[in-house]
Image (tube, rainbow, N blue to C red):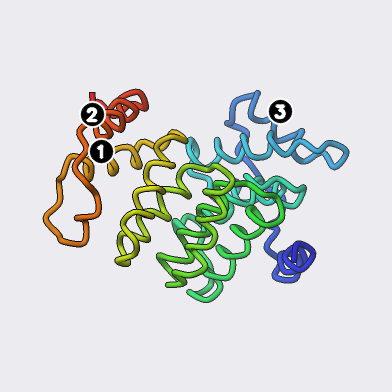
Amino acid sequence: MKNLLFALLATLNLFASEPDLSPLLAADTLEKVKKCKNPDLNATKECVQAGMVAANLKQDYGAAEGLFSLACAKGDGEGCFYLGELYKNNLVKAADKSERETKISAYYKASCVLYEYLPGCLALANFMQEELGDEAQSFAINNTLCNKKYAPGCYNVGWMIERTGGDIGEMMEYYERSCKLGYVGGCERAAWLYEGNFNENRYEQVKKDSKKAKQMRKKACELGDKQSC
């Protein structure tokens, strides 16, 4: 599977040409670019860091694409992820809808499957669900993320169960698990439900529990949710 993905990236020519950055960039960023482009160095983090400067500070998305592409080609999952983000957010234009979807999928899959970069897996799951309508694949990816103790994946599984009318007890388990792993959204949602803030019969399985609600609110507060404090 990994070999097939890398072959797909090469066949589709998804690795961009070398970036041509403005000389107005700060010296430290230019040094990162120099290291990034040096074939004798595996300076992928420098590629990503310089790409972030090009994208966020200079809005030079073509240069950012080139830098992220160098990182991705050298095996950096974060670089592949940011390539997907450029196309996902239409900061770099594809020829048409089909090419856009192909590139986003390929970059996110490379980030996730080839290089096991978990934010890339989360992005892939969201893209599958939101744009391609593949609920089953999205659920499977999120569940795998949750099993790897990646909190947003647990929250997403809980939300997908809730949204599709699944088992409420199982839903709560995923929300609480995401909370324990440090995802504030899971704490907030679990607390809200334990406080009895619902009027649909399907939630009756969630018994009002002020003690658990306070525990969830306390954790949410610790994670930065001021409204829960």
Mark 1 / mark 3, whichever is N-terminal: 3
Q: Quadrant of the C terminus?
A: top left
Residue at label 2?
Answer: 228
Calculate the distance from the C-alpha at mark 3 to the C-alpha at mark 2. Answer: 45 Å
Tags 1 and 3 touching, CB below 8 Å: no
* Element under disc 1: helix
Mark in the foreground, 3 or 2: 2
199 sits to left or right of 156 = left
- Which of the 4 image quadrants contains residue 90? bottom left
Q: Amino acid at mark 3?
A: Glu
Residue at label 3?
Answer: 31
103 sits to left or right of 7 = left
Q: Amino acid at mark 1?
A: Ala
- Which of the 4 image quadrants contains residue 48? top right
Q: Mark on residue 203?
A: none
Calculate the distance from the C-alpha at mark 1 to the C-alpha at mark 3. Answer: 48 Å
Task: From the top left corner, tell me how far across and down residue 228 is, in percent.
Answer: 23, 28
Calculate the distance from the C-alpha at mark 2 to the C-alpha at mark 1. Answer: 9 Å
Residue at label 1?
Answer: 191
Viewer can see residue 82: no
26 sits to left or right of 171 = right
Is 213 or 11 nearer to us in this picture?
213
Q: Residue at x 66, y 47 (%)?
A: 77
Rendered view: 168 above or below 172: below
Task: From the top left corner, tell me how far across and down residue 125 is, in percent.
Answer: 50, 59
Q: Residue at x 59, y 53 (%)?
A: 83
